[in-house]
Image (spheres, rainbow, N blue to C red):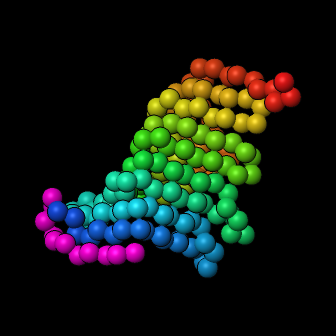
Amino acid sequence: MAVVKLSSKDSIPDVAVYNVHVKESEKGIMTLELTAPRMISYQTRDAYTEFPDGLRIIFFDSVMQPKSELTANYGISWDSRSTMHARGNVIIKNFEKHEQLNTESLLYDKNKRKVSTEEFVKITQPDKIITGRGMESDELFGNWSIRNVSGTIYVDENK
């Protein structure tokens, strides 16, 4: 990981980090692991951090086992708002339930521990694919709901 201190001007990032690998924990238990090719931080009045080349976040359960994973082509995180917006080929996988969410835009609220979108979503389960517009879930993608379901396709893997 290389860290470069650049400037304090609004249009020039304050910090640029390459080959990012961050582990976050609460009370000694790892809760997430973030990796990204590049992270750029701006320490403005509304400080934010960008992941212009994409990111990958693995969320862990209470016994530190990988529970879900989020990947996206772009991400931006606002420190004061405790929110992150992921865009471009956003995928969330729930390893335990073997479910996958695909969408183009997703908002993560760290304080509420919720993810949501108003965009088109596709959720793939072992036996069906559900599509719709608008979705909300917990951060581990364990409990989710689609607001406007537009279709359900049942899959029979035996055929």
| 27 relative position to 55: left or right | right
Which SS does the magenta portion mostly show? loop
Quadrant of the image containing the N terminus:
bottom left
| 62 relative position to 17: left or right | right
Task: Tell which residue pokes out farthest to the top in this image.
Answer: 150
Indicate whether 17 appears above or below 27: above
Task: Tell which residue pokes out farthest to the front in this image.
Answer: 159
Indicate whether 49 appears above or below 121: below
- Residue 23 image offset from top left, x and y in percent: 53, 72
Task: Tell which residue pokes out farthest to the bottom in this image.
Answer: 28
134 in the magenta segment: no
Indicate whether 54 appears above or below 79: above
Q: Quadrant of residue 41?
A: bottom left
Q: Quadrant of residue 7?
A: bottom left
Q: Is residue 75 among what the camera can see?
A: no
- Give the number of marks: 0
| 91 relative position to 11: left or right | right
**What residue is rendered at 16% in x and 70% in y?**
8
- Residue 49 image offset from top left, x and y in percent: 33, 61
Quadrant of the image containing the C terminus:
top right
- Residue 109 image offset from top left, x and y in percent: 47, 53
**What residue is rendered at 46% in x and 32% in y?**
119
**What residue is rendered at 69% in x and 42% in y?**
99
- Residue 70 image offset from top left, x and y in percent: 54, 51
Q: Nearer the viewer, residue 29 or 45?
A: 29
Point out the stretch of residues depicted in magenta.
1-11
Indicate whether 55 appears above or below 120: below
**What residue is rendered at 47% in x and 70% in y?**
21
Q: Is residue 100 among what the camera can see?
A: yes
9 in the magenta segment: yes
